[in-house]
Image (cartoon, coloured by chain):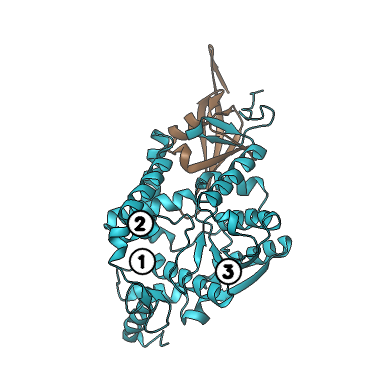
């Protein structure tokens, strides 16, 4: 009989994860504390924790592991820190994938006793993700599915948060997401994005109509998030998003995981660089960008027309060549 | 199981998504070593042994069934 690896902290229970950068094998209970301490640290670092009392939070719940973890942890904190929350599920209309996720979201909210709201992309934006992808593919556009779906989802979350009069929007972005986004911005040479994301750990913004974001899992590795999710017995869906493979993120993720294995803690170091670099260029880069409001929808934008409206117009234009699938 | 002097070999069944393969390993082999042997970065997956979550520092032996789950479902 082979001996099991025990937890390095409690020295009693069976380890379920190796945290390479900390040189620790952790059991499910110790991992749970470890992840929740990181969430508290993220909330304290930005000063959000002290301001939560009496606030109303919208939580972006997609039915994936990260947003479920974020919902579960924030729900636990909601009693102690006295705030209210409502989950929002954006239905992209991606067939069985969206259906299964919607069922998981409804099930979780009922179990936890959280109110939820389902927002249909088709109804709100006039087009579903698969319809948009079909137009992009037929017209051989270089725009990737995630660029449309992501912009529309962010747009809708902000719109719902405004409609609900919410103080914050909570998202399930983890440390890996943040690091990948930073590297993607570097590759694109997108200095504005680096400056904007500098304080994406939930900074308060003073842009009218742009609801501040909170990212509780900002310091949590994706791998830790998955093990937390599984050991808490949450339901997983078997399907992956059919369009994810078109994203550049896939390549970047593999590359960063490779670096992390060779040099444990690399992701933390990249995150620290992202913050330092972003903060030092923030003033210079963003002072020249005047925030205004979209001439079409009135939402905040750095340009005359926001990216969501721009994409909508582009899709209409492209679809006209294909007997106008999308005419709104 | 082949007993060759002091060296004992065993077969471990590996499940990954819909793919099932059998890998011959020295008995009592570290999970990390098996992952590297089949070209998988231990940092991008989690591993179950006979249905239970284990770490890459754990060992497997003849007849064990391990399931490898990618950390990112979309990857």
Chain B shade in the render:
brown
Q: Observer-nearest residue: A116 or A300?
A: A300
Dot in front, 3 or 1:
3
Looking at the rendered structure, which numbered label has been put on residue B66?
none
Report the chain holding disc 1.
A
Against B42, residue A156 (above or below) is below
> Which numbered tag is attached to residue A89?
3
Residue at 50 percent of width and 71 percent of height: A158
x%, y% of residue A15? 62, 33
* Closer to the camera in the image, A223 or A93: A223
- A259 displayed left or right of A157: left
Q: In this rendered view, identify the residue nearer to me: B74 or B2.
A: B74
Which of pointers 1 and 2 lies earlier in the amino acid sequence?
A: 1
Dot 1 corresponds to which residue?
A: A144
Query: Do the dots labelled 3 and 1 sit on one chain?
Result: yes
The verdict on a common chain for dots 2 and 3 is yes
Residue B7 at what x, y percent from top left?
52, 16
Residue lying at 46% horizontally and 63% vertically, measured from the top left: A242
Find residue A130 and report its image quarter. bottom left
Helix, strand or loop at label 2? It is loop
The chain containing the residue under callout 2 comes to A
Between label 2 and label 3, give the one nearer the viewer: 3
- Circles 1 and 2, Cβ within 8 Å, touching? The answer is yes
* Residue A105 against residue A294 in the figure, above or below: above
Q: Does residue A200 appear in the picture of this structure?
A: yes
**Real-space Cα distance between discs 3 and 1?**
22 Å
| Residue A114, image x, y percentages | 69, 65
Question: Which numbered marker is on residue A248?
Answer: 2
Mark-to-mark CA distance, 2 and 3: 25 Å
* Crowd band around label 1 with a 10 angstrom C-alpha radius: few (<14), some (14–19), many (20+): some
User: Chain drawn cyan, letter?
Assistant: A
Disc 1 to disc 2, how far (Cα)? 9 Å
């Amino acid at each position: 009989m082979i001996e099991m690896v025990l937890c390095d902290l409690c020295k009693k229970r069976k380890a379920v994860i190796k945290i390479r950068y900390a040189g620790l094998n952790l059991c499910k209970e110790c991992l749970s504390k470890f992840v929740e301490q990181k969430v508290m640290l993220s909330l304290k670092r930005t000063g959000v924790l002290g301001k939560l009392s009496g606030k109303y939070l919208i939580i972006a719940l997609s039915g994936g592991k990260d947003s479920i973890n974020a919902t579960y942890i924030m729900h636990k904190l909601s009693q102690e820190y006295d705030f209210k929350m409502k989950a929002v599920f954006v239905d992209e209309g991606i067939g069985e994938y969206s259906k299964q996720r919607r069922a998981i979201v409804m099930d979780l909210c009922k179990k936890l006793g959280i109110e939820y709201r389902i927002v249909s992309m088709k109804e709100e934006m006039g087009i579903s993700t698969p319809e948009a992808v079909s137009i992009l593919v037929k017209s051989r556009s270089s725009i990737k599915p995630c660029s449309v779906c992501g912009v529309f989802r962010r747009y809708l979350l902000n719109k719902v948060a405004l409609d609900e009069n919410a103080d914050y929007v909570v998202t399930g972005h983890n440390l890996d997401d943040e690091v990948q986004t930073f590297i993607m911005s570097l590759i694109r040479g997108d200095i504005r994005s680096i400056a904007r994301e500098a304080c994406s750990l939930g900074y308060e913004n003073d842009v009218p109509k742009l609801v501040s974001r909170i990212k509780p899992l900002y310091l949590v590795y994706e791998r830790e998030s998955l093990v937390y999710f599984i050991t808490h017995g949450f339901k997983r869906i078997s399907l992956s998003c059919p369009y994810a493979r078109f994203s550049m993120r896939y390549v970047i993720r593999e590359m960063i995981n490779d670096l992390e294995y060779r040099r444990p803690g690399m992701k933390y170091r990249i995150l620290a660089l992202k913050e330092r670099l972003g903060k030092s260029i923030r003033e210079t880069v963003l002072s020249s960008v005047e925030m205004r409001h979209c001439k079409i929808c009135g939402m905040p934008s750095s340009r005359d027309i926001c990216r969501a409206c721009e994409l909508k117009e582009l899709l209409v234009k492209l679809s006209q060549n294909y007997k106008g699938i999308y005419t709104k | 199981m082949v007993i060759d002097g002091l060296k004992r070999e065993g077969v471990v069944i590996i499940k990954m998504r819909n793919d099932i393969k059998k890998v011959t390993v020295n008995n009592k082999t570290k999970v990390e070593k098996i992952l590297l042997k089949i070209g998988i970065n231990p940092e991008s997956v989690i591993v179950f042994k006979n249905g239970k979550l284990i770490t890459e520092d754990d060992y497997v032996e003849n007849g064990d069934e391990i399931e490898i789950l990618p950390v990112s479902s979309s990857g």
